[in-house]
Amino acid sequence: MARLRSLARCIVAALLWVVAALAVAENGVSDREILLGQSAAFTGTTTGQPAAYRQGAQLYFDRINRDGGVHGRKIKVVSLDDGLVPERAAANAKRLIEKEGVFALVNFTWTKPVAAVLPIVAQARVPFFGAYTGFDGLYAPGQRYVFTTRASFRDELQYIIHHLTSLHLNRIGLVYYDIDGSAGLLLDQVTEMLRRRGLKPAALAQMKLNSGDAAAAVGVISAAKPDAVIIGTSGRDAVAFVRGMAETSARPMYYARSLINTDVLYRELGPLAVGIAVTETAPNPYKHLGNAAREYRRLLNESNPKGKPQYIEFEGYLSAKVLVEALRRAGKTLTRAKFIAALESMSNWDAGGYVVDYSAHKHHGSRFVDIVMIGRDGRIVD
């Protein structure tokens, strides 16, 4: 009888252990690893920025993993290519959640792919962290599983217009894409922000996405001779516009938001790129004296002595640093609910010269915006 009672106690203890283990188990979390999932445009016309964003995050994850991980767990990221196609991004998100079993989705890129994924995130109740875009839908309130680490497009645009009007450069033109959704939103935002200051756009011109045909836009903008032009296009379209404007007598100042690639502008335009102003949503990675920037430069040099600091890579680095801090705060028994609560506890948390501010009612950590300029030899001047 005693042996039976002892056996029964062992069985009960084992069952209690199994129940406890199941109660705390979470997808993507094991004793040794935290599995994260990413989908980004690693092929196509915009490969440089997503690759740099991933490299910056991985630079920090590698450092954390070398030091033993977070509460003994190494961080692993499964990265899939969506080619900037929203349907592929949505399929990748489902695969990462359902097949790969990731703990969270991180560092997705570009507006339309991210917009396609947000309903999946809400339905699956999976954390969606640190996307590289800034459209209004991502920043809408009430999205429990969505956290951002960078200022929104609206924040960047507001900064540009405030800067220009402070300099009494009130004749402002806009060139933007002839597509639905984000393009119409850009026009509406510019028009509204100017209206509040008693102004109207000096000229409006459209371009076809990825056409490289700027003739019509150049004609409209150059005829108006604005003080400044906000470039709402990117890649070869932005290059074609600036090059076309150089052949006219108009000499406006050019301003663009951070998603434009300054390296591409200088590589394609050479001296014509000098003086173009661009908003950035992170401190200058070349010379900022904060601990995060110094640490980033040191780790970059260790991993690639010929590597050059990049804003977008530094953004990825900062995003990873915020995520790791939340994982630490969530504790050894990691769950998605604890991770979200940990992020919400990060009020005015300083990542080393870059502050994020979250709460239960505020999931968008930063509104930091600065304006830099492309200088001689492609160097960034701030």
Image (cartoon, grey):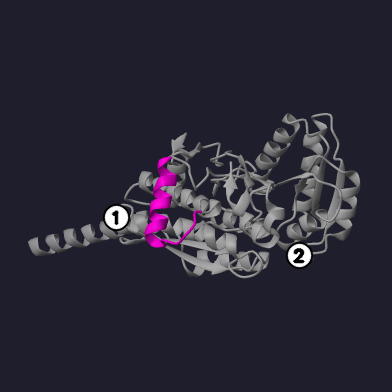
Provide the residue designation for mark 2.
210
Q: Is residue 123 visible?
A: yes
Is label 1 in a helix, a strand or a loop?
loop
Residue under pointer 1: 67
Q: Residue at x 72, y 29 (%)?
A: 166
Which residue corresponds to the image point at 87% horizontal and 40% vertical from the top-left?
202
Q: Is residue 192 left or right of residue 158?
A: right
Q: Secondary structure at mark 2?
A: loop
Which stretch is magenta?
290-309
Reply yes or no: does residue 133 show up in magenta. no
Q: Which secondary structure class fits the magenta region best?
A: helix
Tell me if residue 306 is in the magenta stretch: yes
Q: Amino acid at mark 2?
A: Asn
Q: Residue at x 84, y 42 (%)?
A: 226
Q: Quadrant of the N terminus?
A: bottom left
User: Picture coordinates of residue 279 (x, y %)?
Assistant: 64, 44
> Where does residue 73 sit, x and y in percent of width and height?
32, 58
Instruction: Give percent across and percent down for residue 343.
Output: 46, 43
Give the image quarter of residue 291: top left
